[in-house]
Amino acid sequence: QKLAQHPPIIRAFQTLKECAMKNITIVIPDRFADWEYSLIAPVLHSFTTNYRVRYAAADLNHKTSMGALRVIPDLNFADIPAENAALILIGGQDWRELNPADRATLAAHCERQKTDGNLLAAICDGAWFLAANGLLNDRRHTGNHLDAYRAEAAYHNAAQYQDSQREAVRDTNLITAGAMAAPAFSRAVLEALGDIPAEVLAYLPAA
């Protein structure tokens, strides 16, 4: 009760709590795929207390999903934190429309995430973005179509592509999936974080 009478102390505790929370950054293009993150975000935001979930896009203008959901991003690419427990790229119809500067900025974040050993996860055309920027050349991976990867000059790893339309593929700290593998992708991401309660994971489809 005494603490409740001292707002500065309460604010200090809130600040400490926020500092202890781990960043989850979900990258969305315009016309993003609603279903591809729909299990991940609620678990991390509403069923755990360890994570701060934020959405990043090329700019802070509202983005409209394929299901007509309008979202105002929290961050632009330049402001994505250097430390993320997970950097998650969600599919959508506008990935190929990124301008060169935005593409380079996001690719640099993805490369750092991967090199630092933190979780980098991508589904559908989010995985295509990794392939197009040479970030799948040393790991097992999957996606929508191998031919789409082969069309990218920076992609050189067809040998480690796994044709797995209903399953996610994890190789160390990298997770990829095709558009129809969203449930498996969600479980793979949540399991990889390592601290999601088993009773929560029990409700999710097997990866």
Image: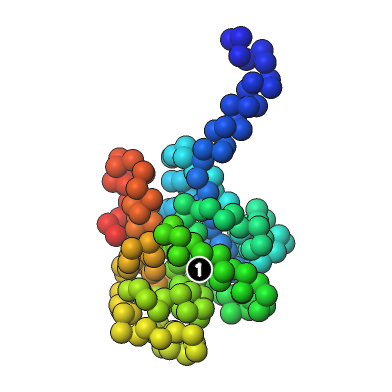
Q: Which of the 4 image quarters holds residue 120?
A: bottom left
Whether residue 160 is visible to the viewer of this picture, yes or no, is: yes
Q: Quadrant of the C terminus?
A: bottom left
Residue 75 appears left or right of 137: right
In front here: 11 or 92? 11
Q: Which of the 4 image quarters holds residue 18?
A: top right
User: What residue is shown at x 46% (from left), y 75% (from top)?
Assistant: 135
Residue on which disc 1 sits: 111
Count of labels in the image? 1
Residue 149 appears left or right of 61: left
x and y percent of residue 98 in the render?
Answer: 64, 76
Dot 1: few (<14), some (14–19), or many (≥20) neighbours within 10 Å?
Answer: some
User: What residue is shown at x 62% (from left), y 69% (from top)?
Assistant: 105
What color scheme is it? rainbow
Identified by mark 1, the residue type is: Glu
Q: Quadrant of the N terminus?
A: top right
In front here: 22 or 65? 22
x and y percent of residue 23 in the render?
Answer: 53, 49
x and y percent of residue 154 in the render?
Answer: 49, 85
Q: Residue furthest top?
A: 2
User: What residue is shown at x 35% (from left), y 54% (from top)?
Assistant: 192
Relative to residue 53, is residue 142 depicted above or below? below
What element does badge 1 sit on?
helix
User: What residue is shown at x 65% (from left), y 72% (from top)?
Assistant: 102
x and y percent of residue 205 in the render?
Answer: 30, 55
